[in-house]
Image (tube, rainbow, N blue to C red):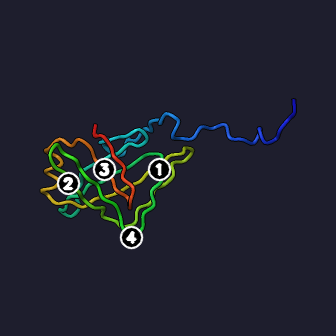
Amino acid sequence: MGFSFSNLLKSKKEPISNQVFPKIKFDGGTKYAENETCDVYLDFEELGGFPFIKTILIGDFPIKVKRVGCSLTFLFENETLTIHSDNTDIQSNAIKNSPFHISEIDFELDENQAAKIKNNPVLRIEYVFKNETYSFKTI
């Protein structure tokens, strides 16, 4: 039986996709939706009399989008509502000592859109970054 340095250097960690997603405690917003690997926190806010939605995503995927921003779609029982990010450049920050990232994204909306989201049951939400779509079930 021989000794091998290559066996010592091999990673013993499983990829994140095969691990159970550990829940990260976050008190900076209202938890609104989730999927297997990401939590979404969503709050309605107002600045200068104009409503907007502040969202925070905490999950295992980093986001880096330049010049195109992203969209957020609310899926109701019989219709959808899509709003667009306030900023066109979006970038995640790594969470220290973990493989996860946090992304803060604000969305512009008007009073009618805010009322529709607040007063109707939302089944799911979908974020679209360039050509990637991430779907979340509301809580």
Badge 2 amino acid: Leu
Q: How far apart are the two marked residues, 4 and 2, measured between alpha carbons? A: 22 Å
Disc 1 + disc 2, Cβ < 8 Å: no
Q: Residues within 10 Å of mark 2 (few under 14, many from 20)?
A: few
Residue under the image location 48 percent in, 53 percent down: 62
Q: Which residue is mark 4?
A: 67
Badge 3 amino acid: Glu
Q: How far apart are the two marked residues, 3 and 2, measured between alpha carbons? A: 10 Å
Residue under the image location 34 percent in, 60 percent down: 70
Of the numbered discs 1 and 3, the one sitting upstream in the chain is 1
Q: Residues within 10 Å of mark 3 (few under 14, many from 20)?
A: some
**Left or right position of 45 against 12:** left
Depth check, front residue: 17 or 118: 17
| Residue 77 in which image quadrant | top left
| Residue 30 in which image quadrant | top left
Badge 1 amino acid: Phe
Of the numbered discs 4 and 1, the one sitting upstream in the chain is 1
Q: Is residue 114 above or below residue 20?
A: below
Q: Which residue is mark 3?
A: 126
Q: Residues within 10 Å of mark 4 (few under 14, many from 20)?
A: few
Q: How far apart are the two marked residues, 1 and 3, measured between alpha carbons? A: 15 Å
Which quarter shows the C terminus?
top left
Q: Which residue is mark 2?
A: 81
Q: Residues within 10 Å of mark 1 (few under 14, many from 20)?
A: some
**Left or right position of 118 against 39:** left
Q: Which residue is mark 1?
A: 61
Of the numbered discs 4 and 2, the one sitting upstream in the chain is 4
Disc 4 + disc 2, Cβ < 8 Å: no
Query: Which residue sits furthest bottom?
Result: 67
Residue under the image location 67 percent in, 37 percent down: 12
